[in-house]
Amino acid sequence: SPMGRSLGMFNIEWRQRLAQYNGLQGGFVIFFDVARLERTAQGEDRTFEAVGGGLRLALRGAFLRLDYGVSISGDNRNTLTAGFGQTF
């Protein structure tokens, strides 16, 4: 994984609730991410872009997320991530 002297990130997403029952909520998200690394160890600047989608579950303030992202930067990478909580 590349490392650089500075990092800039941008994310935009659209969330949609699909169901709500007895304090349990479920939905999905679609997103677009960009990361810009400057002055990497190889002496170059790099930009990474990805699009993807995911599922969200919430129960009384506890959030569970499962996301799948596909790189559109030409490096043919895909990533599946899971976590607790929300970024924002």
Image (cartoon, rainbow, N blue to C red):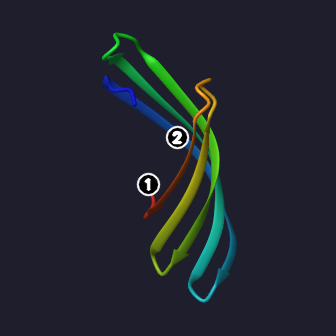
Q: Residue at x 63, y 29 (%)?
A: 72
Q: Position of residue 39 (x, y in %)?
A: 33, 15
Residue linked to disc 2: 11
Measured Cα–Cα span from mark 2 to mark 1:
10 Å
Up-down relation of residue 16 to residue 12 (above or below): below
Labels 2 & 1 near each other (Cβ < 8 A): yes
Local crowd size for mark 2, using a 10 Å CA cut-off: few (<14), some (14–19), many (≥20): few
Q: Position of residue 23 (x, y in %)?
A: 56, 85
Q: Position of residue 5 (x, y in %)?
A: 28, 22
Instruction: Report the amino acid beneath label 1.
Output: Thr
Residue linked to disc 1: 87
Q: Residue at x 48, y 69 (%)?
A: 63
Instruction: Please tell me whether mark 2 sits on a helix, a strand or a loop.
Output: strand
62 relative position to 32: left or right: left
Which image quadrant: the N terminus?
top left
The part of the image, by quadrant, that contains residue 78 is top right
N-terminal-most mark, 2 or 1: 2
34 relative position to 15: left or right: left
Instruction: Please tell me whether mark 1 sits on a helix, a strand or a loop.
Output: loop
Instruction: Report the amino acid beneath label 2.
Output: Asn
Q: Nearer the viewer, residue 81 or 20?
A: 81
4 relative position to 20: left or right: left
Q: Position of residue 33 (x, y in %)?
A: 55, 37
Local crowd size for mark 1, using a 10 Å CA cut-off: few (<14), some (14–19), many (≥20): few
Up-down relation of residue 58 to residue 47 (above or below): below
